[in-house]
Amino acid sequence: MALTRRNLLKSTGAAGAALLTVPGALKGFDQFFRPASSLSATATKVTTCCGICSPACGMQATVQDGVIQFLEGLPGDAHGEGHLCGKGAAGAGFLYDPDRLKYPMKRTNPNKGFDEDPGWVRISWTEALDTIAGKMKGYIDAYGAESLLFITLPGPDLLVRLINAMGIVNRTDHIDVCFQTDRIIQKYTTGGKTWCNDFENAKYILLFGWDMVSKAKIVYANGVVKARSNGAKVVHFSPTYTATSRMSSEWQNIKPGTDLAVALAMINVIVSENLYNKEFVDAYSNFGQYEAQIRSHFAEYTPAWAETESGVAAADIARIAREFAQSGGGIVPAHKKTLCANYMNSTQLVHAVSILNILAGTVDRAGGRYFPRTVAIPGVDAVYPPPAYPAKKGARVDGRDKLPFVQETDSGLFSTLADGMLTKYPGQIKMAFWNAYTILAFPNPPKMEQAMKSVEFVVAMDFLPTDTVSMADIVLPSAMYLELNDVVARDYQAKYPQAMPRVAVSAPIFETKSAGYVAIELGKRLCPDYFKLADGSWINPNVLLDEKVKRAGLGENFAEFKAKGIVEKPAPFVPRTTFATGDPNGKCQVYVPQFAAKGAEALPKWHPKREQPSADFPLYYLTFIPGIHRRNTSENNRILHEIMPTNAAILNPALAKTMNIKEGQTVVIRSRVGQIELPAHLSEIIRPDAVMVAHGFGHRSRYLSVAGGNGSRDGDVVPDASIDDFIAAGNYGGASCIMDVVCNIAPVA
Amino acid sequence: MNSDPLELGRLYAALAQALLQAPANDPAAAREYYRLFLSPEGAPCPPWQSIYMAAEGEQPRLMGPAHHSALQWYRRYGFEPALDNEPADHIGLLLLFYAHLLAVDAPDPELAAYEAQHLAWVPRFLAKLKQHAVHPRFQALAAELSEHL
């Protein structure tokens, strides 16, 4: 380094800077610097909670000059028990990612594609919001509100208010690839989706697929470990040997997509041998009312039959069913992708799982699935009741309105969206607003890219660059959970009500803003009556948060709540005796008459998975989300990248030997819709008739400095679907079938 | 040859401003500025020192140790960056502050310490700028900065 006053003196000095010289002594210094204020450089600790996933583990942030130096678990917290998972601990790696979206930008090159230079230029928030509002109004006036598509979770509540106020029918989210089927089933069988599993008091835990020990959430992983310590038996059905298998008492290497057969056969055994919890079942379920139908229905699903479908020995199925039923505390959790969404028969599977919990008599009982005793946090519509919302008109491009039970949940269908946009309702969507989702999240992403190219105007709001940004006309930089205040009610370990403040430990960096801010600003421009209060002022998100805290009984305002940290309201756990299932007597429903009334199955029937191995595609294709990554949003996090930088085709050495595939060799995986190339990784953890690829890799975004172009997109091999496929298959829960795939594999020469 | 520290300060202030703000009246140059430094798809020439000089054993990130060190320097001389939500170790801020040190005739040991702590990474930034700059304005900027290094 030689930049010194001495060699400067030898230089041509200011004359050399003619291109850039501005007159005046140090012109601009005052523009970029101000007198020092009292900002403290002393590190402080702030109590908050994580925002990586929904349990929101308690967290302490060490902060210096507004910059997070370290994140750690909060001692005494019921969810994290003083710990964070790898993703939570790496939170600052998201916040301070060099690639973080920083300012609103607009595209100046109208041609879109990964090989085009978009010609991004920075714009003000005002210009961005004016442009978006103008486009929304223009499209609604010309084509109706059904021409707008919002790809966002139903939050924050201010954004939902905007969507409702504008009568926008097409809001969709990823819940179909997650837990939507379970949400529907639990609503009608036990009275509502719950995330609470009382593992530590369970006697017998049956896990279908879900690798809950290696996957965050800490609260579940700790729960299983405690259960084992307390002497509970844990049985894991999974086609791969995972950390959960290792932690279990027994691992059953099941054929992919056949868990339903085992669950049906277990019900058969428990019912036919009258092993169910008679006291609970008689008092709190409709088993008695439909007993004849139930006994008759499950009679054909014998363990011997299930063995032929699943490969699990009939004797084992019968034994596990008996052990489970007689344990005095059996629980079968149902969670996300690995159980609820993978296969065309996943809806039936989660129904069977719910029945097993009812038969065990542990619904809202010790050792079972229980309903959270939680703090009710009012939404914006409760705090500031809006004028009546307009009726939503027009077609749902994802076809959700054709599946009445999915329609009721108000979640979306990622798996049918591209087909709807391109085939069923081509040209309907003129404008898309993406909030924190990427094309990578969809099955068959190339088709989703094609669908997005059919949209005239795209807005992408995110905190990190994604492939969606590459397709956008306007990019809005989003503040993230470490930069925003919020109130979070506990609903994973919630035997009594608890709430935590989520604290803005760092001011939003650069010009990042919240989706709530965007909603208010668009609301002011488009539907002011919904964002104006009685006194004529606009909704203020800080005042709204204060009001939520106050109405929830957590403090006078957010500042007071923040000072308290965790607020707990201990109360005795009183088990429910009525269940809001729709049953007139308030009972749990084994037999669901509401399903039958709308053409679905009142009791779960056997359906084979959508795709079966064939001569062309002889292998099962499995995907997974690595425990160290969060869906498809963390691969650019340098800390997490260091731990797991890329993906591979994981296959059994026995299979590799038959194909002459060596460790590290590039292989091609093909399915009926696409192919990917990636290195082979040989491992005994997987069956010889399957191949497995981690989700989340293969981002295409240009210059995305860590994740861009790194690894392969698992979804390129996964077929998307049409809504007609789902209806024909009896997939009334809209399971997205993201693992219902068969493939072949070959070495690349 | 110009030996007036104030003039030298002006030179660095001018270079700093060219790095801190997109050109106002040249749309093509402005696009190049955003592409190089701020592209929402990931910029090829990030202008923050923390990205080039991570702490021992750590991955590069915004607001790293260089941000805090720069803040300390500014504060010792009675200043802070005007935008407190942005990193203090932007190359433009660092050059502008260096210009200030020259203008106030800071002692040589001070200058040497500042150079060692906050300008040693600049050649790596310039190498990227030379590699990726297409527009003549930024090619010239890269050349001019290099000339004085």
Image (cartoon, coloured by chain):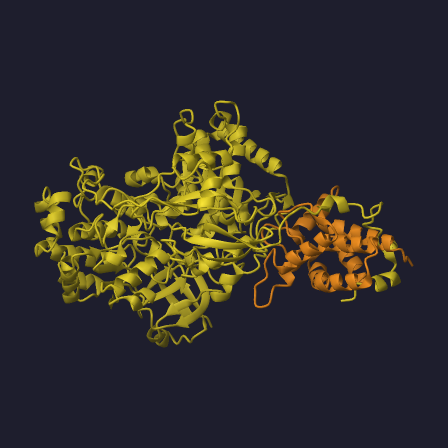
Colour-to-chain, orange: B
The one of A244 and A391 positioned closer to us in this rendering:
A244
Task: Kindly indicate the quadrant of the structure image that contains residue A662.
Answer: bottom left
Q: Is residue A300 visible in the rendered structure shown here?
A: no
Q: Which chain is yellow?
A: A
**A705 on left or right of B23:** left
- Count of numbered tags: 0
Residue farthest toward the right in the current orientation of the protein: B1
Image: A130 above or below A731: above
Q: Quadrant of the N terminus of chain A?
A: bottom right
Q: Where does the image place residue B4, in percent across and percent down from the top left?
A: 89, 55
Q: Nearer the viewer, residue B27 or A590?
A: A590
With respect to residue A697, does A484 lie above or below? above
Task: Say if A507 sits above or below A13 in the image.
Answer: above
Task: Judge from the rendering whether residue A292 lies leftward or rightward of residue A87; answer left or right.
Answer: left
- Horizontally, residue A310 falls left or right of residue A74, namely left
Identify the residue at horizontal 48%, vertical 64% (top origin): A646
